Image (cartoon, rainbow, N blue to C red):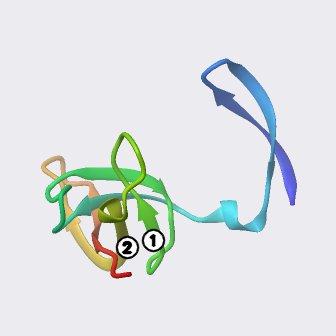
Amino acid sequence: MGRRRARTGIGWQAVTTTAGSARPTRSLRLRGGPLDGSTWSGRIDIGGRVCCGAGAWSPSHVYVVTGQVVRDPEGEEENVAVPAEF
């Protein structure tokens, strides 16, 4: 566990980090479900579940990150994420 400074909406704050925060930041291309075609970005591992979208939490907004990689229009890599099953 370590400490770092992070920019928040109200200024700089010291935050505590754990080994889990060493995950890479991935850009995701959402395939299927209500957010089909949308993109999302965050620190998540392949195989991990992530809740995407704005507004209230919904099971239909939970996606699983796959190892499949596609390129966006600018040529940047995005991992494909598909709706999670419950």
> What label sits on residue 49 in the rendered view?
1
Rendered image quadrant of residue 69: bottom left
Which x, y percent locates residue 73?
12, 49
Q: The C terminus appears in which quarter of the rendering?
A: bottom left
Q: Is residue 22 left or right of residue 83?
A: right
Q: Residues within 10 Å of mark 1 (few under 14, many from 20)?
A: some
Name the residue that disc number 2 marks. Answer: 65
Rendered image quadrant of residue 72: bottom left
Determine the secondary structure under disc 2.
Answer: strand
Residue drawn 28% across the image and 72% down it: 83
Which x, y percent locates residue 4?
80, 42
Q: Is residue 24 left or right of residue 47?
A: right
Q: Residues within 10 Å of mark 2 (few under 14, many from 20)?
A: many
N-terminal label among 2 and 1 = 1
Instruction: Note whether 73 is above or below 62 in the view shown.
Output: above
Instruction: Note whether 76 is above or below 50 in the view shown.
Output: above
Q: Is residue 13 left or right of residue 53?
A: right
Residue drawn 18% across the image and 65% down it: 33
Residue contact at pointers 2 and 1, CB within 8 angstroms: yes
Which x, y percent locates residue 65?
37, 73
Which x, y percent locates residue 16?
82, 48
Camera-side mark, 2 or 1: 1
Q: CA distance from mark 2 to mark 1?
A: 6 Å
Determine the secondary structure under disc 1.
Answer: strand
